[in-house]
Amino acid sequence: MADLKFEIKQSLGILSEGSKGWRKEVNIISWNDRSPKIDIRDWDETHEKMGKGVTLSKDEMKKLKEILLKLDLDKLEV
């Protein structure tokens, strides 16, 4: 498998941190020299290791924002 190249262009925030120091982060990342995307995934403290995540285009992020703003979080069964 070829090496995965990434560059974190901007850190938007940290959603949570696990007991072993891994953090679920929201970042803008360029993967393999492609256009940057919004990315949500777990990272170790040095950003050398990562977990599985979700990568969204700007349009997808706008749609997700619309969906989240419509939700009544107190009524969700999670």
Image (cartoon, rainbow, N blue to C red):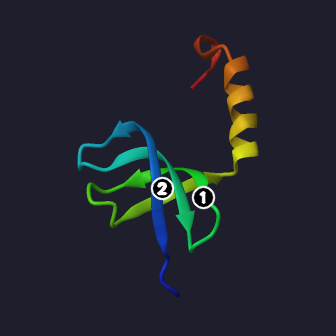
In this picture, residue 20 sits left or right of residue 17: left
Q: Amino acid at mark 2?
A: Lys
Query: Which secondary structure, mark 1?
Result: loop
Instruction: Locate residue 46, reporting x and y percent.
Output: 27, 60
Position above or below: 49 against 43? below
Neighbours of disc 2 within 10 Å: few (<14), some (14-19), many (20+): few
Instruction: Locate residue 15, reporting x and y percent.
Output: 42, 36
Residue 9 numbered mark, or none = 2
Instruction: Locate residue 70, reporting x and y percent.
Output: 73, 18
Q: Quadrant of residue 60?
A: top right
- Viewer-nearest residue: 48 or 53: 48
Residue shown at 72% from the left, 36% from the top: 62
Q: Which residue is mark 1?
A: 36
Neighbours of disc 1 within 10 Å: few (<14), some (14-19), many (20+): many
Residue shown at 31% from the left, 57% from the top: 44
Callout 1 touching callout 2 (CB < 8 Å): yes
Instruction: Locate residue 7, reporting x and y percent.
Output: 46, 64
Q: Amino acid at mark 1?
A: Pro
Q: How many marks?
A: 2
Query: Which secondary structure, mark 2?
Result: strand
Which residue extends farthest left?
A: 20
Residue 75 numbered mark, or none = none
**Who comes first in sequence, dot 1 or dot 2?**
2
Q: Quadrant of the C terminus?
A: top right
